[in-house]
Image: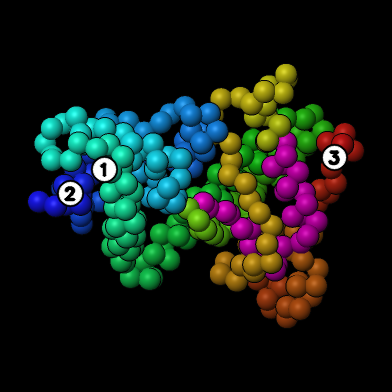
Amino acid sequence: MTQQSQVRKLALHLMKRKDRNAPFSPLPTTQVVESFKKTGAGSPTLDNFRVNILGKPVDKWNKAAAQLFAAYFVESGWFSCAEVDVVAQAFTRHIPALQRQYKRSCQVEDERPEDELDIVDAEAADARRRLLRTRRAESCDVHPGIRKFRELWESLTYEVMSSDEAEHRGGKTRYLVTKMPWRSPEVTDFLRVFDKLHLSTRFKTNGGARRGAFPHHRYPSSCIDTKPSPVPGLPKNFYDEIWFSSLNVGEQKALRPLPSVDIALPAAVLA
């Protein structure tokens, strides 16, 4: 067995993979890799041997993994080579192959019909909108000046909230807010204030963050959400004035608009 074959064999063993087509265990997160890069804490271990597949073969994490691998390779006595640096170099040369295997495994996992993937994405976006509506409604208790909006929030369903699209780049995910042509810009501004109010509850009086996950950040975008129909039965000022005037009389009646409501927020809340 050649040295490179020995490296491949031990890599499979340490990464707990049956063969090169087997799935990968969870990769080290970006936070873990960056923390190790800056502080040296949380280095690779034999018990949970992981390669930074999404990084460069010679980044700090992968260099440490190569040295750890090489030391175990030599100390195990299973293989012929006894030079740690030579084995570490051989392992580093093997990382591009691991990256190709990982890429193929991801493609296999996503080999579902496109319409099925669309359904999965839509369901995830739907769930995010429901959580968004819940957070905003619960924020009515944050400030006395907005408690008057409790009744309004009881009548607003999650469909009134803007959806978002997940954008995946470089192993990271951003959520881009899609615009609803039928909803009034004033309502958009009104709803975003509740996001800020909710965020304020995530911090202690001394400025430190409270325990628990923060809501994911939603980035403004020029994307137009053309899928959902306008929500009927809302106060008339919730509908965009220009959009509403473009409808014929029958379409306007079908929306069953309610009388407009005052959504002006107190100056103390906006400060």
Magenta stretch, residue numbers: 172-197
Q: Residue at x 69, y 66 (%)?
A: 222
Residue at which label 2 appears: 3
Mark number, residue 87 = 1
Q: Position of residue 239 (x, y in %)?
A: 74, 64
Q: Residue at x 64, y 29 (%)?
A: 202
CA gap, disc 1 and disc 3: 62 Å
The secondary structure type at the circle numbered 3 is helix
Q: Quadrant of residue 134?
A: top right
CA gap, disc 3 and disc 2: 67 Å
Q: Position of residue 180 (x, y in %)?
A: 67, 64
Q: Residue at x 29, y 57 (%)?
A: 97
Q: Nearer the viewer, residue 120 or 97?
A: 97
Q: Residue at x 36, y 33 (%)?
A: 44
Depicted 204 relative to depicted 77: above or below: above
What residue type is disc 2 on? Gln
Quarter of the picture holding the C terminus: top right
Mark number, residue 269 = none
